[in-house]
C-alpha cells in the first residue's frame, strides 16, 4: 500500500509533539518535586491567618468543606456533596475514607482516624470562639447553629439567607483540623507543625526559608507530585529571576513590569487571574462641588480613560465601566454607554452647572476655581494613571492636581470624609457592591458617603438571594442605578499573574485555595 508523503509528515510531526516537553499529548507523570516561590509564610495554623500566601501552603495540608474551582464557583473537597433544602439550611455530606495525616507526634504511623462531621463542627466552632481570635470569624458570622446529623453529615443553619457562604474567603477558606493536634501541640506548636488531611503532609517548616511537603499516599485522589517545596522569596522580581534560572517552577506573584517580557519566553507559561481587581476614582458626594450630579458626570467623561489604561497597563488590565469585574456575578460591560469620552460634553455639563472660564482660562463659578485634587496612595501604576487624567483635565480648564499619600493617611482620609475625588477602595469580590455603596457602610468601605434608599433596597435583596440568576438580575439593576448617580469614575480591572515553568501541567492559578490536587486537577511535572 502506498503512503501519502503528507500523511507520513503528519504522523512524524505528531510523534515529535508527543515527545516534546510541553506537549498536551504527553501522559501525566508521577513523581518529582514542585518548587514554588512565595513571598512569605507567617503561620501554619489555618485559623489564625488572613494571608493568601499562608493559605497557598495550607490548602495543600488541609481540606476545606469546599474549594474554589476554576470558574470561581465551589467544587467538592471534604464535602463531596451539599444541598439547600431551604434558604437558611445547608447540609454537607462528608467524603468517607479521608484520614488525618499519620507518622507524626499526634497520630503515629498507622494510627490515624477518619475525618468526620464532628471535626467539621469542632473546626467551625474554633474559628467562631472569641478566644481563638481568628480573623476568619467574621466569615462565619451568619451561622446560627452547627449540627452533626451523623458521622458524615453536618447541617448549618444561618440567621438569614446567605448566598455567599461557600465563597473563597468564607467556608472555602476554613480548614478542617483535628482537635487532638490543637490540644496536644497547643496553639504555637500547631502553628509550626500542623496535622491535616490534605494531599500533602508537612516535612519541615523553616521560617523565612521554606516549607517542605511530601505526598499523602493515602489521599482520596493520589497526588502525582512526590514533593512540594515553597521557597520564601520576599522580592517578586527575585522570584521571577529564580524561575528563569530554574531554581523554582512557579512564581505566585509576578510584578507588572515583568509580564510582557515573560510572555515572550517559550519556556514559561503565564496564567492570568480569572477575576480582574477593580480600580477606580471615587467622589465624596457630600463635598462641594462633587455633591452635584452634573459636575460628577462631567468629570466622568472628561478624560480618555481607554487610552490611559492601554498606555499604563497594556494587556494587564481592561477598562472598567462599573464596579463588578469579569469573573464576578453581575459583570456588565453594557455600562459603557454611561461614560463615553466626550470632553466637549463635559464642558457643556460644567457650563450648565455654572462654571465658565476666568481670565486665566481656568473654569470658575462665583469667583471660585473648579479645583480637583485627586488623592491616591503612592503606587506607581495608579499615580501614572491619575497623572494622565490630571493633565487632560487641565487642558479643559479644570484646576486639577494629584496628591500622593501613604496608605495609612489615604485610608484615614477616605473614612473620615477628608476627600473630594480620590483613588477608591477596591472591594472586588461578590459582595463588593454592598461594601462600597450601601449607606450602612458610609464612612467605612463606602468612602463616597453615597446614600440611595432604592439602591440600599436592591443591595439588601441581592445579599439574601440564593439563586444566582435572580441575584445577578438584582446586582445588574443596582449597579446601573449606582453608575447613573455617578459616585465613582470606574477606571480599570487589573489582572494578577502567576508564572510557571512550561513543564508544569494541569496548573490552576490561586483563588485563595491553591489547588494542586482537587476535584478538577492534579498537577504534574513533565521531567
Image (spheres, rainbow, N blue to C red):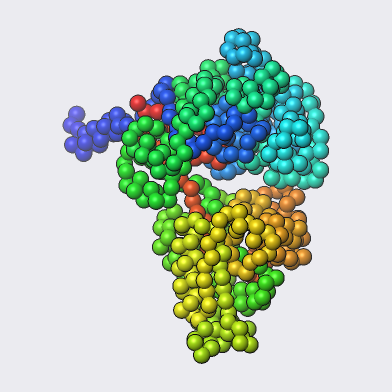
Q: Position of residue 239 (x, y in %)?
A: 41, 38
Q: Residue furthest bottom?
A: 359
* 365 left or right, relative to 251: right
At 52% from the left and 71% from the top, the residue drawn is 401
At 58% from the left and 54% from the top, the residue drawn is 407
Q: Position of residue 379 (x, y in %)?
A: 49, 56
Residue 160 to residue 433: above or below: above
Q: Position of residue 75 (x, y in %)?
A: 61, 36
Instruction: Out of 7 and 336, give the one closest to the viewer.
Output: 336
Looking at the rendered image, the quarter that the N terminus falls into is: top left
Examine the image and state in which quarter residue 129 appears.
Answer: top right
Instruction: Out of 266 and 249, give the one closest to the viewer.
Output: 249
Examine the image and state in which quarter residue 51 appears.
Answer: top right
Q: Position of residue 86 (x, y in %)?
A: 79, 41
* 517 left or right, relative to 417: left
Looking at the rendered image, the quarter that the C terminus falls into is: top left
> Can residue 243 be spotted in the picture?
yes
> Can residue 64 be spotted in the picture?
no
Residue 363 to residue 111: above or below: below
At 52% from the left and 28% from the top, the residue drawn is 207
Residue 268 to residue 43: above or below: below
At 46% from the left and 58% from the top, the residue drawn is 381
Amino acid at each position: 500500500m502506498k503512503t501519502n508523503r503528507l500523511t507520513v509528515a503528519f504522523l512524524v510531526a505528531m510523534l515529535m509533539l508527543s515527545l516534546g516537553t510541553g506537549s498536551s499529548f504527553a501522559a501525566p507523570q508521577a513523581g518529582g518535586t514542585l518548587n514554588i516561590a512565595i513571598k512569605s509564610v507567617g503561620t501554619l495554623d489555618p485559623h489564625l491567618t488572613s494571608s493568601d500566601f499562608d493559605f497557598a501552603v495550607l490548602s495543600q495540608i488541609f481540606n476545606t468543606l469546599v474549594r474554589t474551582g476554576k470558574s470561581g464557583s465551589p467544587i467538592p473537597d471534604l464535602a463531596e456533596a451539599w444541598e439547600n433544602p431551604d434558604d437558611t439550611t445547608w447540609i454537607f455530606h462528608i467524603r468517607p475514607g479521608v484520614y488525618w495525616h499519620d507518622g507524626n507526634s499526634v497520630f503515629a504511623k498507622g494510627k490515624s482516624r477518619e475525618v468526620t462531621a464532628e471535626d467539621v463542627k469542632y473546626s467551625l466552632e474554633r474559628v467562631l470562639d472569641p478566644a481563638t481570635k481568628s480573623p476568619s470569624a467574621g466569615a462565619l458570622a451568619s451561622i446560627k447553629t452547627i449540627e452533626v446529623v451523623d458521622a458524615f453529615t453536618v447541617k448549618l443553619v444561618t440567621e438569614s439567607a446567605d448566598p455567599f457562604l461557600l465563597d473563597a474567603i468564607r467556608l472555602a477558606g476554613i480548614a478542617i483540623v483535628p482537635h487532638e493536634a490543637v490540644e496536644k501541640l497547643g496553639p504555637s506548636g500547631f502553628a509550626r507543625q500542623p496535622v491535616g488531611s490534605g494531599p500533602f503532609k508537612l516535612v519541615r517548616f523553616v521560617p523565612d526559608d521554606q516549607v517542605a511537603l511530601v505526598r499523602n499516599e493515602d489521599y482520596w485522589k493520589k497526588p502525582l507530585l512526590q514533593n512540594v517545596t515553597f521557597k520564601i522569596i520576599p522580592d517578586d522580581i527575585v522570584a521571577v529571576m529564580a524561575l528563569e534560572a530554574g531554581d523554582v517552577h512557579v512564581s505566585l506573584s509576578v510584578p507588572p513590569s515583568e509580564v510582557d517580557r515573560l510572555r515572550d519566553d517559550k519556556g514559561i507559561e503565564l496564567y492570568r487571574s480569572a477575576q480582574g481587581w477593580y480600580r477606580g476614582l471615587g467622589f465624596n458626594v457630600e463635598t462641594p462641588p462633587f455633591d452635584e450630579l452634573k459636575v460628577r458626570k462631567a468629570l466622568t467623561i472628561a478624560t480618555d480613560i481607554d487610552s490611559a489604561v492601554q498606555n499604563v497597563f497594556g494587556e494587564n488590565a481592561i477598562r472598567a465601566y462599573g464596579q463588578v469585574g469579569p469573573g464576578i456575578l453581575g459583570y456588565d460591560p453594557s455600562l459603557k454607554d454611561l461614560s463615553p469620552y466626550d470632553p466637549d460634553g463635559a464642558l457643556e455639563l460644567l457650563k450648565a452647572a455654572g462654571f465658565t472660564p476666568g481670565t486665566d482660562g481656568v473654569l470658575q463659578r462665583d469667583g471660585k476655581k473648579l479645583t480637583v485634587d485627586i488623592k491616591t496612595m503612592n503606587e506607581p501604576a495608579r499615580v501614572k494613571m491619575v497623572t494622565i487624567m490630571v493633565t487632560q483635565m487641565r487642558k479643559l480648564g479644570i484646576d486639577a492636581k494629584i496628591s500622593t499619600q501613604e496608605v495609612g493617611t489615604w485610608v484615614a482620609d477616605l473614612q473620615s470624609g477628608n476627600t473630594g475625588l480620590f483613588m477608591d477602595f477596591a472591594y472586588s469580590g461578590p459582595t463588593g457592591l454592598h461594601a462600597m455603596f450601601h449607606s450602612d457602610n458610609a464612612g467605612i468601605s463606602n468612602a463616597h458617603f453615597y446614600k440611595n434608599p432604592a439602591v440600599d433596597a436592591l443591595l439588601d435583596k441581592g445579599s439574601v438571594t440564593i439563586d444566582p440568576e435572580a441575584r445577578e438580575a438584582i446586582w445588574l439593576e443596582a449597579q446601573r442605578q449606582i453608575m447613573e448617580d455617578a459616585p465613582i469614575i470606574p477606571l480599570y480591572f487589573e489582572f494578577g499573574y502567576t508564572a510557571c515553568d512550561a513543564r508544569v501541567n494541569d496548573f490552576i492559578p490561586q483563588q485563595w485555595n491553591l489547588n494542586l490536587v482537587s476535584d478538577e486537577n492534579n498537577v504534574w511535572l513533565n521531567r
